[in-house]
Amino acid sequence: MMRKSSKKSSKVPPAQKTKKLPAPASRPDVRLADAEKFLLPTYKRQPVIMTHGRGAYVFDSTGKKYLDFLGGIAVNALGHAHPRIVKVIRREAVRAIHLSNLYHNAFQGPLAHKLVEWSGLDRVFFANSGTEAIDGAMKLGRLYGRTPEEPVGAPAKKHRFLALENSFHGRTRFNDIADLEAKFDDTVCAILLETVQGEGGIYPVSEAFWNRARSLATQHSALLIADEIQCGLGRTGRYFAYQKFSSKPDIALVAKPLAAGLPLGAILTTEGVASRVSPGMHGTTFGGGPLACAAALEFLSIVEEEKLLENTRARGAELCEGLKKLALQFDFIREIRAEGLMIGIELSIEGAPFVAEAMERGLLINCTHDFTLRLLPPFIITRAQVREFIKLFETVLTKTSKQASASASGTSAGPERVAQAVGRG
Ligand SMILES: Cc1ncc(COP(=O)(O)O)c(C=O)c1O
C-alpha cells in the first residue's frame, strides 16, 4: 500500500529543517578527524557523516541523498522522521525521558499488552537492547532448568544452551535435524535460534527443524527461544516470523524496530516461565523508559493503522520479482532468499565492491558473510521506491561487474575501490 498522504504527513517536521552544511571541498572535516583519533576502531566506516533522514531517504553532510535499503540495519522500519513518531517523542521528551523501574510509567503496561496480543505469549520484560534481551532470556533458561532441590549457586543438571551455526554464536548445524537430535538431552535448558538468520545471510529456519526443536524442547523440559530481534515485529510480513509455523516458542526476543530508533528490547514469554520469576531476580536501568515505550506503542499502532504488514508483503514480492529478473541478466547472482522485506542476494563473487558502488550512486545496502548482499528497507517503502531501487541496483550490478572483469583481465577501470564491509548488526 502507499503511505497515507495526509496533509499532516507531508509536512517536514521541524526537527528535519536542518541547515544544509557546506560541502567539505578540499578541507578535511574536523568531525571525521576527531572520530579517527578518539574512537575505538571497532568499525570500518564509510568516510561520510550522515546528518538526517526523511521517509526512505538519508542525507549526508554534503547534502547527498541516499535511498535507504538498510534501514539502520533493520531498525528504521518506519523510515526516518515519521511525523507520528516525531510528535510522540516531542510530547514525551518534555514530560519524562527516564524515570525508574522502581515505579510504573504510563506506557510499559499498555505496550506489554499490545506485544502480548501480537505474539500470543503472556508476559513481557523490557530491556535496553537486543543483547540485553538475549542476556535476560538465557537467565530465564537457567532459572527454568533448575529444580527446587538444586540450591541456587550450585551447578544445575540442566545448564546447556544450544545455539545454531551462523547466528550470533552457536555450533548446532542450522536446519540439520539429526545434529539437533544428537545434541539435545536432559542437560539442555534452552535452545536459542533466529527464526530467520539475519547476519548469517537471510536463512529461514525450516518448518521441519522448528517443529523438531519445539518437540525436543518440550520433551526435555527446555525452553525454545526465538531471537526475533532482526526478523520480528513485521519485517517478514507477519507480526513475528514464527507465526508461519503452528507452534509458538516459550520466549521471543525483539528489539531493533521496536521503539522506531530509540533503544528498546523486550523478552516475551509464557505464564509458565514467568511464574518462576520473583522481584529482585532481574532488572535494568534503561530498559522500558517512558520515552522509548511511548514511541514503541506508537510504532505498533502505525504498523496496524497504516497496514504495513500488507505493504511489507506486497513490496517484498515486487522486490523479489525485480531481483529475479536481474538474476537472469547477471550470472554471478546465485540465489535470492527473501521473507517479506528481509532479503539476501547471494553472489558468487565478493559483495563489498557492490556496496561501495551502491553508496556512490546514492543507495544504502550492506554485505554479510562476504558474498550476500542484504536488503532491509523500511516497511513504508512505496512501489515507486521499489522501482527506483531496481533501476539503481541494475546500474550497480553492471558497473561493478565490469570493473571486476576489467581488473581480472589486468585493465583496471579507474582507481581501485575500497572494498568495504559494513559493520555487524
Ligand atoms: C538476530 C540478532 N540478535 C541479536 C542482536 C543484538 O542486538 P543489539 O545490537 O540491539 O544488542 C542483533 C543485532 O545486532 C541481531 O540481528
Image (cartoon, rainbow, N blue to C red):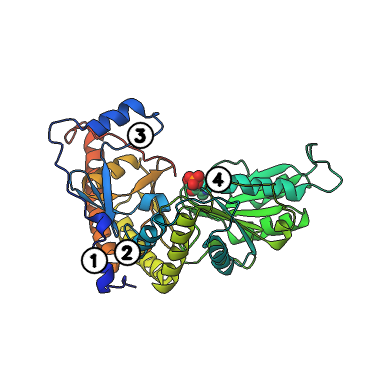
Which numbered disc flags the more N-terminal residue, 1 or 3? 1
Which residue is nearer to you in this view: 236 or 321?
236
Disc 1 to disc 2, how far (Cα)?
8 Å
- Of mark 3 and mark 2, the one earlier in the sequence is 3
Q: Residue at x 46, y 50 (%)?
A: 263
For residue 31, what is the image quadrant? top left
In front: mark 4 or mark 3?
4
Kind of residue at disc 4: Thr
Tag 2: amino acid:
Pro
The residue positioned farthest toward the top in the image shown = 37
Question: Which residue position holds label 2?
Answer: 83
Type of amino acid at the residue the image marks with label 3? Lys
Q: Position of residue 26 (x, y in %)?
A: 12, 31
Instruction: Say which of marks 2 and 4 sits in front.
Output: 4
Residue highlighted by disc 3: 44
User: Which quadrant does the C terminus fall into?
Assistant: top left
The residue lying at 14 percent from left, 42 percent from top is 22
Q: Say which residue label 4 marks.
A: 285
Do residues under tags 1 and 2 come within 8 Å of each other at their CB atoms? yes
Residue ID at (12%, 35%): 25
Above or below residue 331? Residue 38 is above
Q: Residue furthest right?
A: 149
Q: Residue at x 50, y 59 (%)?
A: 232
Q: Earlier in the sequence, mark 1 or mark 4?
A: 1
**How far from the left and from the top, in percent, is residue 178?**
68, 50
Q: Is residue 110 visible?
A: yes
**In which image quadrant can residue 89 be found?**
bottom left
Tag 4, which secondary structure?
loop
> Do the CB atoms of the residues marked 3 and 2 lie less than 8 Å apart?
no
Residue with the mark numbered 1: 11
